[in-house]
Image (cartoon, rainbow, N blue to C red):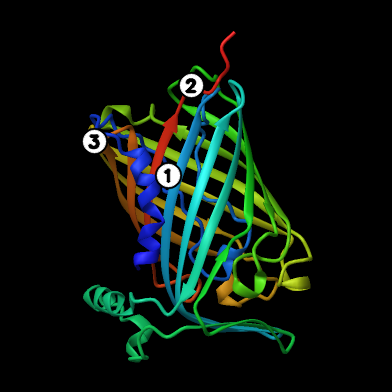
């Protein structure tokens, strides 16, 4: 745990000067799918129609934690996923011009037995949904296995730390760059196979996505509510660990809203989902899924927004039992050259 928290310290020292907090901004949780198998693919994190203004840099530091206990078997593939995955992502977005944004995401991934089993079991008992169906399996075990056509593709039983795939991104602002109201952008990503697939730090292939994203603070402005949504498609090539079992085109999307009862606080709820990644119908670890994520955004000193979120799967066996997110967001300006 100390190693994970140490990643945050240098970043927070930069982001938190002793100045007054500004009003909180509502944006989606920077969420990707929490499954250890699915997160290896290029499904992009949720973003909206807001883009970095020209000459500014938008920075995010996001820590995701997900606890998994699910499995599945198909005619040609099987998976057992019992463990915990932590993903720390540094995301940068630069406003190249009034409409154009360029970005890069770099991630550090840890797969292990973790330490959240006890807490999650207590939480699920409290809501009447026992973890592991109440079977009482040993806590904090680690066993990530994926087999295809009888061959062991992924077999992790010891803790793994690895750098993930690099995600390059671009966005084109479709609405007026000077419009502070409803904002629309066309977003594209390209995932490079820099992470080792054997460590579940990447899929082993190059993938690309395209989506339309919207941020709407106008429609429900009288209730201090901002709406956001996005929808798009991901292309998966034949060079991933799924081989010919992959679906070449996967649809994905996000819809949600944020309410600001105070200038320093936002309450958010969003749903994220995608279609199946595998051609084998009924193979739940790679099937279509939807998960809900809710939580808060706090305005901190120095123009920093902090997200605290918790995600719960809606469809059993298609996603981890629960996921958590801690995120920081700050915009830096003044990077254009003077004439």
Earlier-in-chain disc, 1 versus 3: 1
The number of numbered discs placed on residues in the rendered structure image is 3
In-image side of 74 versus 206 (left or right): left
* Whether label 2 touches label 3, CB < 8 Å: no
Q: Splitting the image into 4 quarters, where does residue 197 fall?
A: bottom right
Residue at mark 1: 28
In-image side of 288 versus 309 (left or right): right
**Quarter of the image containing the C terminus?**
top right
Figure check: 50 above or below 73? above
Q: Element under label 3?
A: loop
Please state which of residues 19 and 166 is positioned toward the viewer in this rendering: 19
Figure check: 281 above or below 6? below
Q: Position of residue 300 (x, y in %)?
A: 27, 38
Residue at mark 2: 334
Disc sitting over residue 264 in the figure: 3
Q: CA distance from mark 2 to mark 1?
A: 25 Å
Please state which of residues 185 and 39 is positioned toward the viewer in this rendering: 39
Earlier-in-chain disc, 2 versus 3: 3
Q: Is residue 101 visible?
A: yes
**Disc 1 crowd, CA 10 A, few/some/many (<14, 14-19, 20+):** many
Q: Position of residue 164 (x, y in %)?
A: 59, 61
């Amino acid at each position: 745990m100390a190693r994970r928290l140490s990643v945050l310290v240098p970043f927070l020292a930069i982001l938190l000067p002793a100045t007054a907090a500004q009003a909180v901004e509502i944006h989606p949780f920077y969420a990707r799918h929490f499954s250890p198998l699915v997160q290896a693919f290029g499904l992009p994190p949720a973003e909206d129609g807001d883009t970095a203004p020209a000459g500014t840099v938008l920075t995010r530091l996001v820590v995701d934690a997900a606890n998994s206990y699910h499995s599945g078997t198909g005619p040609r593939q099987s998976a057992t996923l019992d463990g915990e995955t932590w993903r720390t992502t540094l995301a940068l977005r630069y406003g190249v011009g009034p409409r154009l944004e360029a970005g890069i995401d770099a991630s550090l991934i840890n797969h292990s037995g973790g330490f959240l089993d006890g807490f999650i079991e207590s939480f699920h008992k409290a809501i009447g949904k026992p973890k592991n169906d109440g079977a009482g399996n040993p806590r904090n075990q680690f066993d990530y296995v994926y087999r295809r056509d009888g061959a062991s593709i992924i077999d992790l039983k010891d803790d793994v730390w690895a750098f993930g795939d690099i995600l390059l991104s671009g966005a084109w602002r479709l609405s007026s760059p000077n419009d502070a109201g409803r904002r629309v952008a066309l977003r594209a990503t390209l995932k490079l196979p820099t992470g080792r697939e054997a460590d579940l730090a990447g899929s082993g292939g190059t993938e690309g996505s395209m989506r339309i994203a919207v941020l709407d603070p106008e429609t429900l402005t009288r209730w201090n509510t901002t709406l956001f949504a996005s929808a798009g498609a991901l292309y998966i090539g034949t060079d991933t660990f799924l081989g010919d079992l992959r679906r070449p085109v996967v649809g994905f999307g996000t819809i949600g809203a944020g309410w600001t009862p105070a200038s320093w606080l936002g309450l958010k709820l969003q749903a994220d989902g995608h279609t199946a990644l595998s051609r084998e119908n009924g193979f739940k670890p790679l099937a279509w899924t939807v998960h809900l994520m809710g939580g808060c955004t706090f305005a901190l000193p120095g123009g920093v927004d902090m997200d605290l979120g918790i995600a719960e799967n809606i469809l059993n066996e298609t996603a981890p039992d629960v996921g958590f997110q801690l995120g920081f967001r700050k915009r830096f300006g003044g990077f254009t050259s003077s004439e």
